[in-house]
Image (tube, helix red, strand yellow):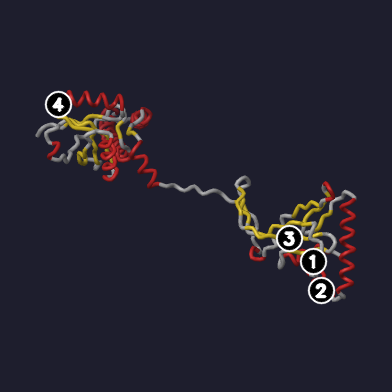
Amino acid sequence: MRLEHYIGELLYRHNCVVVPNFGAFLVNSVSAQIDSKKQTLIPPRKLLSFNQRLSTNDGLLISHLAEIKKKPYDTLLDQVEQEAKKWMGTLEKGESLLLDGIGKLWMGKEQKILFSPEDTPNYLTTSFGLSTFTISPISREKLKEEVVALEERVPFSITPEKRQTLGIRPFLKYAAIMLLVLSSGVSAYQFYSNHQKQQQLAVEEEAREEVSRYIQEATFFESTPLELPAFHLDISKKTSEARHHVIAGAFRVRENANKKIATLQQQGYKAHYLGTNSYGLHQVAYASFSDGNEALQFLRKIKATVSRDAWMLSVREK
């Protein structure tokens, strides 16, 4: 008699199936789980276990067999007890007992039966058809948070490598043009001169776009600021007499500029809002001075003790 087959059938509908004079097989429902080491998702299932102490006949297994085999209850009870006796004999010999669809049993220390369940089948009927599958982590970009964070801490700079790239690119173009000119017999000097002017204009336009993009992404200037077009600032009357301003930062979002002003004022600086420049950035000053030497001394102090990215903006009197 393949008793394990009938035990498996009952485990789909009941949480405990007792084999008289042997023990009970129990199932407990567990939710879906993620195995981070194996990168797999395990669906909801019933976890199978064995309890040697629950060996008193509860009638469930025998009644199920009687309904299927159409035999008397007592007859089937004797057959099940005989099968259980064979199972116990196998374990007492030190051999393992393999029950198909159930698991593996063996005798441990102090005559205690140990049990290792099979991974399949899943006795939870609501998870029928679901199987373990491999998952891949999803990378999510928090662009808004990254922009706000970078805006307050990333210095503006154009690396030497970038300058070198801008310089090499037209050189290679000129070399290719010269080869074509020489091979075709056209006047090299005139052609090169005209094309050089066109390429120089294109390179200058590309450089202006590159600088504009870096300014929009950055907050502070690193080291000496680049030579940019003159800033047209909307300076309030309060600072109209002060022509020299020690700049703490230039922000794309006005709210971030206000936060910077509040922080600096809490630290004891006479920080204030200067207005927007020609690039649409909101400028914040540590302080403003009417005397250029005094402003320069303050700038050196800020660069030495607070921020190396500070710089000075001087506005000419109209």
Q: Nearer the viewer, residue 310 or 131?
A: 310
> Which label sits in the foreground, 3 or 2?
3
Q: Which mark is residue 68?
A: 2
CB atoms at circles 3 and 2 under 8 Å apart? Answer: no
N-terminal-most mark, 2 or 4? 2
What's the amino acid at mark 1?
A: Tyr
Q: Percent position (x, y) of residue 134?
A: 61, 51
Q: Percent position (x, y) of residue 148?
A: 35, 43
N-terminal-most mark, 1 or 3? 1
Within-10-Å neighbours for mark 4: few <14, some 14–19, many 20+:
few
> Which label sits in the foreground, 1 or 3?
3
Q: Percent position (x, y) of residue 145?
A: 39, 45
Q: Which mark is residue 228?
A: none
Residue 246 in view here: yes
Cα distance between the residues tagged 2 and 4: 105 Å
Check disc 1 and report the residue beneath it: 6
Q: SS at mark 2?
A: helix
Cα distance between the residues tagged 1 and 2: 10 Å
N-terminal-most mark, 3 or 4? 3
Check disc 3 and report the residue beneath it: 26
What's the amino acid at mark 4?
A: Asp
CB atoms at circles 1 and 2 under 8 Å apart? Answer: yes
Image-quadrant location for residue 288? top left
N-terminal-most mark, 4 or 1? 1
What's the amino acid at mark 3?
A: Leu
Q: Is residue 257 shown left or right of residue 29?
A: left
Name the residue rendered at 87%, 70% in the picture. 76
N-terminal-most mark, 3 or 2? 3
